[in-house]
Amino acid sequence: MNILEFERPIIELEERIKELKDFSSQRHIDLSSEIEKLEKKLENLKKEIYGNLAAWQRIQIARHPQRLYTLDYINRIMTDFIEVHGDRLFSDDKAMVAGFAKLEGERLVVIGHQKGRDTKENIERNFGCAHPEGYRKALKVMKLAEKFKLPVIILIDTPGAYPGIGAEQRGQAQAIAENICQMFGIKTPVVCCVIGEGGSGGALGVGVGDRILMLENAYYSVISPEGCSAILWKDSSKVREAAEALKLTSFDLLKFGIIDEIVPEPWGGVHKDPELSSQNLKEALLRNLRILQKLPLDQLLKKRYEKFRKIGVFKE
């Protein structure tokens, strides 16, 4: 079941309630009052645990193997998806999916990182870590969206861009920098949403948009807590301290003005109620797209540029 350590008290109480219900049904004994007390206790326990999650606990939820990925959302909330392959230079990167789709009848372009469900698929998808050709493919499809006047939705979910020798030889840094630069001038509405992990340049390479949304238990950071703890403390066990110091949760980033909106998740994360989570994301995407589509193009681009120029506070 992939139970997280901090969830064990909840799971144990749920199992106890289930056992009582089964016992009551099999023996025809009325235990409704006892069950009702335990269910109230369970609800309070969920509020106590899930309502006060630490940064590291949210990261564990963001990385949960049963969490919905880009293609899961596309299949659940969109129709008529036609995937586009290749970057016209090297090959097709399966860690980055891109194509045309419809959302409530609205034609658009959708782009996103894609992870795998098992070892074989994770190797095929490179664990959601895109190569330069993935970022070039994403930019190619954004240019098509601009040409056909289609809005762009980008779903971000990556530990980071792939740092291998081959990727560096093929221009990983250049591909990410080119995307960031070009995305400021894409002449169509762009809505980005961090649906899981938002790791460093891997996320930023497709992370420039008019609206930046974030699922409640996702994280968005310049470096992973593991990398941060290894650099600052020379100790990989300091991940909890690193997670808190990095201020990488959706609530931190909304407060700092990095993101524009938090998309709510069910108690315990997206995987606890995929249907509700999908509908929450769909509603947020549609609402933001409709607002952006009312803006004149020159105003849209100006606001996009100003949005990112305002990020960050410094003193001289």
Image: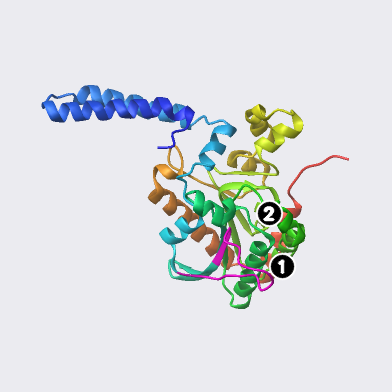
Q: Which of these two is toward me, 266 or 94?
A: 94
Residue under label 2: 204
Magenta part of the protein: which range?
81-98
Residue found 40% across the figure and 48% down from its top: 274
Quarter of the image containing the C terminus? top right
Q: Earlier in the sequence, mark 2 or mark 1?
A: 1
Mark 1 Cα shell of 10 Å, populated few (<14), some (14-19), many (≥20): some
Q: Which mark identifies residue 310?
A: none
For residue 296, say whether it is visible.
no
Seen in the image, is 311 located left or right of residue 98?
right
Identity, as a three-letter code, of the amino acid under mark 2: Leu
Residue at 48 percent across and 69 percent down: it is 101
Q: Say which of 86 and 28 sits in front.
A: 86
Residue 185's disc number:
1
Classify residue 141 as left or right of residue 121.
Answer: right
- Quadrant containing the N terminus is top left
What residue appears at the point 59 percent right and 77 percent down from the top-left corner?
A: 148
- The vertical placement of 84 against 21, above or below, is below
The kind of secondary structure element at disc 1 is: loop
Q: Percent x, y for residue 154? A: 58, 59
Residue 29 x, y percent position in the rendering: 12, 24
68 relative position to 210: left or right: left
Amino acid identity at mark 1: Gly
> Is residue 121 toward the left or the right of residue 201 in the image?
left
Instruction: Compute the Cα span from label 2 to label 1.
Output: 15 Å
- Residue 86 is covered by the magenta coloring: yes
Closer to the camera, 23 or 282? Answer: 23
